[in-house]
Image: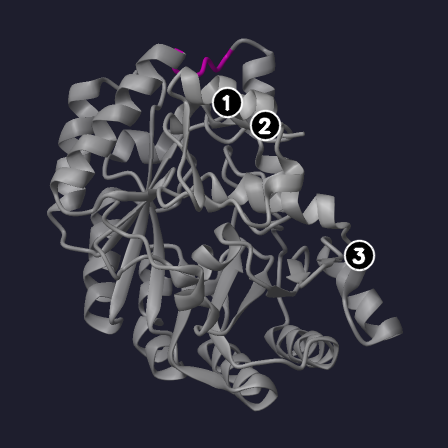
Amino acid sequence: MIHNVKDRLESLNVSGTFAPSQEHFSNNGVALYIHWPFCVSKCPYCDFNSHVRASIDQDVWREALLADLASEAGAWPRGPVGSIFFGGGTPSLMEPATVAALIAATGRHWGFTPDVEITLEANPSSVEAARFADLAAAGVNRVSLGLQSLDDAALRFLGRAHDAAEGLAALDTAQRAFRRVSFDLIYALPGQSEAAWEAELGRALAFGTGHLSLYQLTVEPGTRFAALAAKGDFVEKDPDEAAALYERTQALAGGAGLPAYEISNHARPGEESRHNLAYWRYRPYLGVGPGAHGRRGGVATLRHKKPENFLSALARNHNGLAEEVPLTAAEQASERLLMGLRLREGVLLEGIRPALDLAAVERLERHGLIRRDSERLYALQPLLLDGILGEIAA
């Protein structure tokens, strides 16, 4: 319900207590995204660039990602790097030596800010959790754990390979291994009551992590859930029920000291994902690996998605690029608006004015859907963001 603009968001690598300025972020360095495209299995709700292969040659992929990283350093020599995000796919399937090599190469190419944030997405299987200490030794200082649910029946429905006990054991291991830990939960599942979600969220908040990503289940095109929905075997949550769950989520998480700083992301002040803030604030970021997107200032980049095509392009061209497209000023303003309105802090008016229909802005202000001050524009009804953007975008 809140991800209908996902196609555009995906091209950007992508959802009052906390309001650091643009100037604060500008000193935090460039953001780097590294994509590991492989998973053990494909979840029925997932439409990310993930692939299942019988075997993966870790040496081949280590060298491929290092080569693609080097090509990107040549195209964007400005540093230092303030954040690295290993996404996927399932990056916790990478050998720690590969992660260490990529972090070290990043340091050689660009250098790091003193407080660099290095995040790795991880599945909570016991096999992957056993690597957490080695990943921390490699330089990872923040992990994003895909728990998705604390209920065994829900995990089976979501096609997850772990059960709740295994997930909680992995969370405990992560909290001992990494300085910062976040985990994901999916809610608004068919048949899930408000009381059941309140109990699950209350339990999650008690674990003491500084960051939570809380996503409503949506049916995305091309997924197994979409195929089931087309046959009538899957029915999404009623929109009014989903909205009630969203509002309750905001109240419970905010009351526990983790207010939403973005539509689906909650954090204690200072625990926000600096890497994802780079996207939402539309700062330059670099993308490496199959399917990775980047924004080198006014240039949009896209790597080949299929792993085999990526390797072929790398062999031919010494990089995995599929597209490298200059963006007009109007396109950049539109993207900045699309991303920035997701944030509780709003989006700076400077830089988005070419993308705004001012008459529509005034109309929605009168209806209490958005607010302007001298510097920023804010969305007051996040669940209606798709419609708001459709109205105010010039």
**In this view of the protein, which residue sits in the foreground, 60 or 375?**
375
Task: Tell me where residue 244 appears, x and y as whole percent.
Answer: 27, 18
The label on residue 358 is: 2
Identify the secondary structure beneath mark 2: helix
- For marks 2 and 3, the one nearer the N-term is 3
Count residues near mark 1 (Cα–Cα under 10 Å), then give few for <14, some for 14-19, many for 20+.
some
What separation in Å lies between label 1 and label 3 (alpha carbons)? 32 Å
Name the magenta segment's main secondary structure.
loop
Q: Quadrant of residue 297?
A: bottom right
What separation in Å lies between label 2 and label 1 (alpha carbons)? 6 Å
Q: Residue furthest bottom?
A: 108
Colouring rule applied to residues = one colour
Please give the name of the residue rendered at 55% of the width and 60% of the height, measured from the top-left corner: 283
Does 90 appear above or below 176? above
Residue type indicated by callout 1: Glu
The label on residue 66 is: none
Does 133 appear above or below 85? below
The label on residue 362 is: 1
Count residues near mark 3 (Cα–Cα under 10 Å), then give few for <14, some for 14-19, many for 20+.
some
Position of 235 with respect to 17 (left or right) is right
Residue type indicated by callout 3: Pro
The label on residue 326 is: 3
Count residues near mark 2 (Cα–Cα under 10 Å), then give few for <14, some for 14-19, many for 20+.
some
Position of 333 with respect to 247 (left or right) is right
Please give the name of the residue rendered at 14% of the width and 47% of the height, measured from the top-left corner: 257
Task: Tell me where residue 166 appears, x and y as whole percent.
Answer: 25, 51
Asked if labels 1 and 2 touch by Cβ distance under 8 angstroms, the answer is yes
Q: For the magenta stretch, what is the residue range?
A: 233-238
Please give the name of the residue rendered at 16% of the width and 28% of the height, measured from the top-left corner: 198
